[in-house]
Image (cartoon, rainbow, N blue to C red):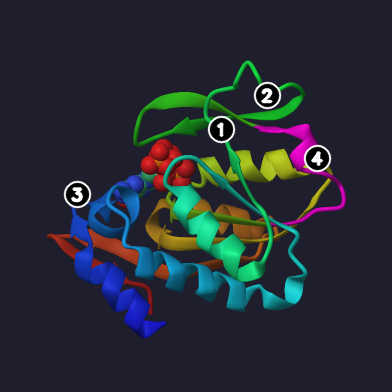
Amino acid sequence: MELLKDKILGQAKVVSDQILRVDSCINHMIEPNIMVEIGQEFAARFQEEKITKVLTIEASGIAIGLTTAMALKTPLLFAKKKVPSTLGDYYMSNIYSFTKNEAVAISVAKEYLTPADRVLIVDDFLARGEALKGLTHLVKQADAKLVGIGIVIEKVFQGGGKALRDAGVRIESLIKVSRLANGEVYLEE
Ligand code: G4P
C-alpha cells in the first residue's frame, strides 16, 4: 500500500491550494498497473462485504471501477452524466461540480440497480462530496444496500468525507490529503 501511495504521489502535481493533478496516471493518461493495484486494494478492504455491484461515475471513475470490479468478480455500473434518450426507465440525481461550476444530472438504468444489490461506490477524488452524494442517492432510490465507498485521493480539507462519514457511510481512502500548499502535498497523519 505504501508503494502504491508513493507511485501515485510521485506523479501528482499541485495546481493550486485546492487542486491536485494526477493526469499522468489516473485522470487522463492511465497507468494500468496502478489501476490494477488500486482495484486490488479496494477489493481487499471490502472483501467480507459480499458486494454484488461496483458503482462509479463517468469518466475518470470507470478505470478504477473496472479493476475493482474485476478483483471482486462483480459487474461495474457507471452513472452517466447525460440522460441518454435510449436509457428507458432510470434513476436520476442532480449534482453540482464546484471545480467546473456547473450542475449535472446523473443517471443509471433501473434494471441495473436493484434492492438485491450490495453496492461499493468508487471514485478518483473526494472533494466536497457532491458526486458521491449523487451516487449514494441513486443507490437509495433503488433500495439497494450501500456497503461503502472507496476513494483514491480524499482532499480532507474540503469536507466531503466528514459529511458522509457523519451520515454513517464507511469510506476507505487510499490517500488522505490534509492540505495543499506551496506546491506541496501534506498527508493526514
Ligand atoms: P466533489 O464531487 O467531491 O464535490 O468535487 P467537485 O464537484 O469539486 O468535483 C468535480 C470533478 O472534479 C470530479 O470529476 C472530481 O473527481 C474532480 N476533482 C475534484 N477535485 C479534484 C482535484 O483536486 N484534482 C482533479 N484532477 N480532479 C478533481 P468529474 O467532473 O467527475 O470529471 P471526470 O470524472 O469526467 O474527470
Residue 73: % across, % down: 67, 66
Q: Magenta stretch: give its range.
A: 108-119
Separation of marks 1 and 2 at Cα, in angstroms: 10 Å
Q: Quadrant of residue 4?
A: bottom left
Label 4: which residue?
A: 142
Label 1: which residue?
A: 80
Label 3: which residue?
A: 16
Q: Is residue 39 above or below residue 131?
A: below
Camera-nearest residue between 87 and 152: 87
Marks 4/2 in contact by CB < 8 Å: the verdict is: no
Disc number lying in front (1 or 2): 2
Residue 11: % across, % down: 21, 65
Separation of marks 3 and 2 at Cα, in angstroms: 38 Å
**Which badge, 3 or 2, comes first in the chain's sequence?**
3
Label 2: which residue?
A: 87
**Which badge, 1 or 4, comes first in the chain's sequence?**
1
Q: Quadrant of residue 170?
A: bottom right
